Image (spheres, helix red, strand yellow):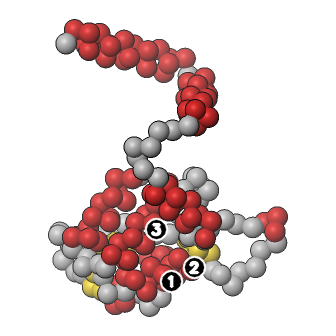
Amino acid sequence: HTHPALLSVRKLASGGEASQECLHLWELLECAICDPRVGTQPGPPLICASLCERIYDACSNAYFSMDVKTQVLAPCGVNDFVCGRAAEWVSNGTDLCLAAGFQVKSSDIVHVASEETFCYGDKASLGSVADSWKASQFESTKKGENSVILDDFQQWARDMPFNERVSWAIGGMVLTAGLVFI
């Protein structure tokens, strides 16, 4: 799922004439598919209306086009014949997110606490994304984090069907033998 998101941001940067703020916010929007609370739910990710409005404010002058196959509004690319500013396609942030293939949680909908639906783009979710971007890729991980990763891997291997485990083991032996041979 990350490759189409990367392509979308790249198209916006190269052909969409987007501002830095627009690029940053569009990237946040595309990251919704990877958020464990909304990206794993059935259907399109649920985006907070407030984030959609911020994106519209920043991207209303950037160029978008309607994808012929999916009928989804996407950043204008080299092969797109009909491109227009976002403000020409949609009139507000909610419409922009809906046209881009996302669901939108309106800010005026009141939910009972037990039925609260999480939407991507609230302060908590954006804070966690920002924190992950701030963390250097070269920082060493803590021992506790390593054990969590190991536990996750072990659980993944236990849940795997036996024939798939055998295939992974054979593949690992072939790769190891190839490295030894080289």
Q: Which residue is mark 3?
A: 29
Q: CA distance from mark 1 to mark 2?
A: 6 Å
Residue at numbered disc 1: 53
Disc 3 secondary structure class: helix
| Residue 110 appears in the picture as rendered | yes
User: How far apart, in angstroms, are the residues tagged by discs 3 and 2?
Assistant: 12 Å
* Three-letter amino acid code at the position of disc 1: Glu
Q: Is residue 40 above or below residue 93?
A: above
Q: Which residue is at 24% across, 79% downward?
A: 17
- Count of labels in the image: 3
SS for dot 2: helix
Q: Which is more toward the observer, 117 or 131?
A: 131
Q: Are marks 1 and 2 in contact (CB under 8 Å)?
A: yes
Residue occupying image coordinates x 21% and y 74%: 15
Q: Amino acid at mark 3?
A: Leu
- Residue 57, compared with residue 120, is above or below; it is below
Q: In the figure, is residue 85 to the left or right of 162?
A: left
Label 3 CA crowd tier, 10 Å (few <14, some 14–19, many 20+): many
- Disc 2: which residue: 49
- Say which label, 3 or 2, has the lower sequence index: 3
**Label 1 SS:** helix
Q: Position of residue 49 (x, y in %)?
A: 57, 79
